[in-house]
Image (cartoon, rainbow, N blue to C red):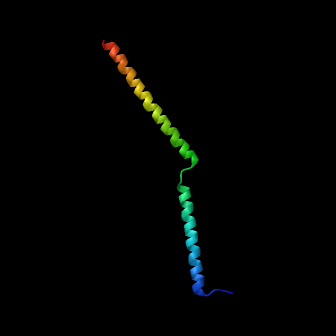
Amino acid sequence: MVPDPYTLEKMALAHRQHLQREAEHEQMLGALPTHSSHWIRHLAARLGIFLIALGTRLRKLEQYRMSIVVH
């Protein structure tokens, strides 16, 4: 049995809405960061912390050396 035009239109609209929701869901999943990008950000953060700590230690060492030279 073939549905009437009104029912066919409602079914087509419901199908399009379903496809639209699926497409939006896939798009949102695609926008999520991958595991590898998380790892890279974590590594970059750790490297930044290390470089800041190294710079602080070098600055203190330089200040110590300058205080010895002055005295």
Q: Quadrant of the C terminus?
A: top left
Taking the spot 66% from the left edge, 86% from the top edge, the residue there is: 2
Give the residue displayed 56% in from the left and 57% down from the top: 29
**In this view, 13 is above or below 27:** below
Residue 4: name its quadrant: bottom right
Q: Position of residue 60 (x, y in %)?
A: 38, 23
Horizontally, residue 68 falls left or right of residue 14, namely left
In the rendered image, residue 19, in percent from the top left (x then y), is placed at 58, 69
The residue sitting at 50% across, 39% down in the picture is: 44
In the displayed image of the protein, which residue is found farthest to the right? Answer: 1
- Residue appearing at x 37%, y 17% in the figure: 65
Is 70 placed left or right of 45 in the picture? left
Above or below, 54 against 10 in this view is: above
| Residue 25 position within the rendered picture, expressed as x and y whole percent measured from the top left | 55, 62
Where does residue 59 sit, x and y in percent of width and height?
A: 38, 25
The quarter in which the N terminus is drawn is bottom right
| Relative height, residue 17 to residue 50 (above, below) | below
* Farthest top residue in view: 71
Q: Is residue 10 positioned above or below 25 on the image?
A: below
| Figure disc tally | 0
